Amino acid sequence: MERTKVDKLECRNPALFKVMWLSTVVWVIVAVANYFGHWLLPNKLDGFGLSILFLFGISILCCFGRGIMNLISQHGMMAIDTLTRKVALYAFMASFAVLLVISIWELCGTMDNDSNFIRNGAVTSISLEAVVSIIGDIIKAAIFSIVIVIFYWYVRICFMMFSGRIRRIGVEIALALILLAYLCGYANNMVWVNIAIVLIAMAFLYDIWRIADYQEEKYQMNWIKKLTEDDE
């Protein structure tokens, strides 16, 4: 399958993007320097950095959201095709089955351990709790299937349909998520983990800066240039 090379995406809010990008770069530099100097408390610095990263993520969605939507709509990905429906359906069925088994296990375990369930009228309370649990499982399964569809689109965008800088950003995001999952399960302060975090962050910051297309600024500059030429 031929891939479309994408090296530029429309950035709707250049000022917001530049401010948050610079803030993230400054935090990364301070964090690296503090690793060797130990001037600031790591917990405080990490907490401050998480706030910056959260705001930076929101700013990326605000700045590049329309560009990404235009990109995927031009290639027909906004239409819910047969494969997308199958992915959503199978994800929903599998997650609902697993959640239902867990709910049955928990309800039966509670009934076996609690002698009050054996009394008269216990059937009504069990049925009500079971209905609430099943409704909750349906909602959770629906949310999980939506997440799976988003992940499926992410894989198609970054690894199957497009190439260029957008693909590198997709790889960097995937590596960051894998590293985050590793740190959640095995929190440590190993040197190679810190080096990997810094390298991924630097590569992502470089690529996200290079992919930004400030069309609004170009339009304004061309409009001003044309206006001055007309006056002459």
Image (cartoon, rainbow, N blue to C red):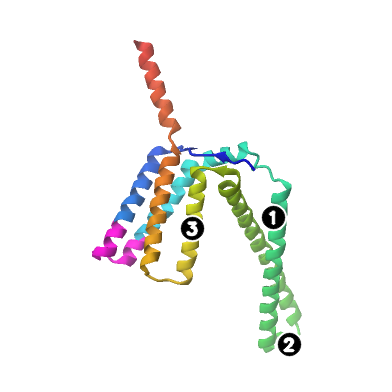
How far apart are labels 3 and 2 at the CA level?
52 Å
Residue 52 sits in quarter: bottom left
**Helix, strand or loop for disc 1:** helix
Count every numbered label the image shows and give the total. 3
Q: In this view, does 73 lie above or below 188?
A: above
Q: Is residue 226 left or right of residue 168?
A: left
Which label's residue is closer to the chain start, 1 or 3? 1
Which numbered disc covers residue 175? 3
Q: Does the magenta stretch include residue 29?
A: no
Q: Tell me the amino acid under the disc marked 1.
A: Val
Q: Is residue 221 left or right of residue 147?
A: left
How far apart are labels 1 and 2 at the CA level?
42 Å
How far apart are labels 1 and 3 at the CA level?
24 Å
**Helix, strand or loop for disc 3:** helix
Which residue is painted at 63% across and 58% down in the image?
Answer: 143
Q: Can residue 114 be seen here?
A: no
Q: Main secondary structure of the magenta part?
A: helix
Q: Tell me the amino acid under the disc marked 2.
A: Ile
Disc 3 crowd rating (10 Å Cα; few below 14, some 14-19, many 20+) is: some
Q: Where is residue 199 in the image (x, y as percent from the top left)?
A: 39, 56
Which numbered disc covers residue 87? 1
Q: In this view, does 27 lie above or below 63?
A: below
Which residue is painted at 69% across and 60% down in the image?
Answer: 92
Q: Can residue 130 be seen here?
A: yes
- Magenta residues, as a range? 30-47
Which residue is label 2 attached to?
A: 118
Q: Position of residue 5 (x, y in %)?
A: 54, 39
